[in-house]
């Protein structure tokens, strides 16, 4: 029983990090109907910057996280501006190919020796791991950190989307670009903001991931990126609560499979679930089938 | 107030507007009528800069607004209620109306505008906290118009406000349009329902295949042989 509960907590830790990435996928999809395949690589850049921040640049780790978030927010805006905006009203497949191009570019550019280098780097944790025994279950300070950071981020996001003018603009743009323009919304700026927000969250996820699983390399974003994308689709792409729900499920499935079945099967089962869900509920768990009113 | 001069618009290689010109004077209701595909909606979309014209100019209150960004045009006092209403289904009625005032900074005054809209459309007030997607077609149209006037426009562009509504609701919508106009808002109305449009409008332009083929006083056009046979079904 204790073993099972510990796995639940491990799954939660993983799921929360996936949630930070999945939110960026889902928000960007909601607003420009694009799967931003470079998003996992922004997560990677975020992990590296955080690592450099607290390892080489002498920043306290919370400051390193914020620095990484700010930088990745800018990176996200630049990616959108250069690679997606010129293709915004082109057939969707074209922007998708551009996204894949950006993804490869970031991976291989960051692998260059004068950038991050292609080697694995072991992350020296900026805070020493402390674990507590609660009713036979071990909980670490890193798990608590991730939980607190992600929940705080979710509350912040909820506040932005539902309580601010920018949030109202985001929801309007995701409904219809032209309708938003007619209400006076600056669509380009709203989209830039969405990319900034999503990328900042991915960066936070990247740094937390590097602290929790302390090994980083330029291709580290691919798998978590795919899992988070799967999570977003699983929950219902374009829906913020869906991304969180999907990510938590993915975290549990992956951890439980590794713990009770076989760690080699965990990716196969995680993606297998995606296929099954899509076959029976193509709009995801929380997705509605749209009915159009005439 | 609004002067559209020789605008030419293309959709890819297809020319949709062949040098369309018309004007709207302060205080008027002007209507553009014509068949499907005549270029009525395209004209409105060009005025609010959703489409860029290849040639021609659009002047609003003496200022050239051709090529201005659409979100800036709203702040000039021009509001466009699009075809198909485009109410945001997963926002409440209240949130939709607030979006209409997106460009305004005068918070206190926005509350006053909300009251105005609610007194004009009591049904919207009853449903203020309901999602807009759950409203009936007529209520959605009222919401779309209400949202359009939340920006306190000097000129209101209405694209097919009667589309898909029952005759009784059509009457109601047109009487609302007249009231809004009599309270000081100039209106440019695009309609397929030429009969109703000519009844409320002061002047009208008839569009055919991207050209203005007739224009004049609405009452005179109502009596015009050609208009009667082509658009009023007589």
Image (cartoon, rainbow, N blue to C red):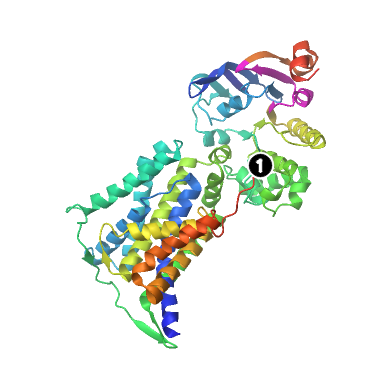
| Residue found farthest to the top | B225
User: Residue A174: where, in percent of width, then height?
Assistant: 53, 46
Q: Residue at x 78, y 20 (%)?
A: B232
| Mark 1 neighbour density, 10 Å: few (under 14) some (14–19) many (20 or more) | many
Look at the image and say whether residue A61 sits in the magenta stretch: no
Number of callouts: 1
Residue A131 occupies quadrant: bottom left
Q: Secondary structure at mark 1?
A: helix
Residue B201 painted magenta? yes
Q: Disc 1 sits on a residue from what chain?
A: B
Residue A230 in percent (x, y) is at: 44, 58
Residues shaded magenta: B190-211
> For mark 1, what is the residue?
B147
Residue B106 image offset from top left, x and y in percent: 60, 45
Furthest residue toward left: A113
Quarter where residue B47 is shown: top right
Q: Position of residue B150 (x, y in %)?
A: 66, 41
Q: Is residue A92 left or right of residue B122?
A: left
Residue located at (44% from left, 49% from top): A193
Instruction: State the quadrant of the C terminus of chain A.
Output: top right
Instruction: Name the residue rendered at 43%, 49% in the picture.
Output: A35
């Amino acid at each position: 029983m204790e073993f099972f509960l510990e796995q639940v907590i491990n799954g939660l830790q993983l799921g929360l990090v996936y949630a930070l990435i999945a939110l960026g996928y889902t928000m960007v999809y909601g607003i420009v109907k694009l799967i931003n395949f470079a998003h996992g690589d922004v997560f990677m850049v975020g992990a590296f910057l955080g690592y450099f921040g607290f390892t080489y640049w002498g920043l306290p780790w919370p400051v390193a996280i914020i620095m990484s978030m700010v930088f990745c927010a800018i990176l996200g805006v630049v990616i959108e501006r250069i690679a997606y905006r010129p293709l915004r009203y082109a057939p969707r497949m074209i922007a998708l190919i551009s996204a894949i191009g950006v993804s490869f570019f970031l991976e291989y550019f960051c692998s260059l020796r004068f950038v991050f280098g292609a080697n694995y780097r072991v992350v020296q944790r900026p805070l020493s791991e402390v674990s507590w025994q609660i009713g036979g279950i071990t909980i670490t300070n890193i798990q608590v950190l991730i939980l607190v950071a992600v929940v705080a981020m979710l509350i912040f996001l909820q506040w932005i989307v539902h309580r601010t003018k920018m949030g109202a603009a985001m929801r309007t743009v995701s409904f219809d670009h032209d309708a938003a323009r007619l209400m006076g919304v600056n669509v380009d700026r709203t989209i830039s903001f969405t990319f900034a927000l999503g990328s900042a969250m991915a960066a936070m996820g990247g740094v937390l991931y590097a602290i929790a699983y302390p090994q980083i390399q330029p291709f580290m974003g691919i798998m978590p990126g795919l899992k988070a994308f799967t999570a977003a689709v699983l929950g219902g792409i374009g829906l913020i609560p869906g991304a969180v729900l999907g990510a938590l499920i993915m975290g549990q499935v992956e951890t439980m499979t590794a713990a009770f079945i076989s760690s080699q099967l965990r990716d196969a089962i995680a993606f297998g679930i995606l296929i099954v869900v899509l076959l029976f509920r193509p709009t995801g768990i929380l997705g509605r089938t749209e009915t159009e009113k005439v | 107030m609004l002067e559209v001069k020789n605008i030419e618009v293309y959709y890819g290689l297809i020319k949709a507007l062949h040098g369309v010109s018309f004007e709207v004077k302060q205080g008027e209701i002007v209507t553009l009528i014509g068949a499907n595909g005549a270029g009525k909606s395209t004209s409105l979309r060009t005025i609010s800069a959703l489409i860029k014209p290849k040639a021609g100019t659009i002047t609003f209150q003496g200022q050239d607004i051709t090529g201005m960004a659409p979100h800036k045009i709203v702040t000039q006092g021009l509001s466009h209620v699009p075809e198909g209403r485009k109410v945001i289904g997963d926002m409440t009625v209240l949130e939709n109306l607030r979006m209409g005032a997106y460009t305004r900074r005068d918070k206190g005054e926005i509350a006053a505008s909300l009251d105005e809209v609610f007194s004009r459309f009591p049904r919207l007030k009853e449903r203020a906290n309901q999602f807009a997607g759950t409203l009936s077609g007529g209520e959605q149209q009222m919401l779309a118009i209400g949202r359009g006037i939340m920006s306190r426009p000097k000129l209101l562009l209405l694209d097919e406000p009667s589309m898909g509504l029952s005759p009784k609701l059509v009457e109601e919508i047109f009487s609302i349009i007249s009231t809004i106009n009599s309270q000081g808002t100039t209106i440019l109305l695009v309609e397929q329902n030429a009969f109703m449009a000519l009844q409320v409008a002061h002047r009208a332009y008839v569009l055919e295949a991207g050209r203005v083929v007739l224009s004049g006083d609405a009452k005179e056009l109502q009596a015009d042989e050609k208009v009667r046979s082509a658009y009023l079904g007589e």
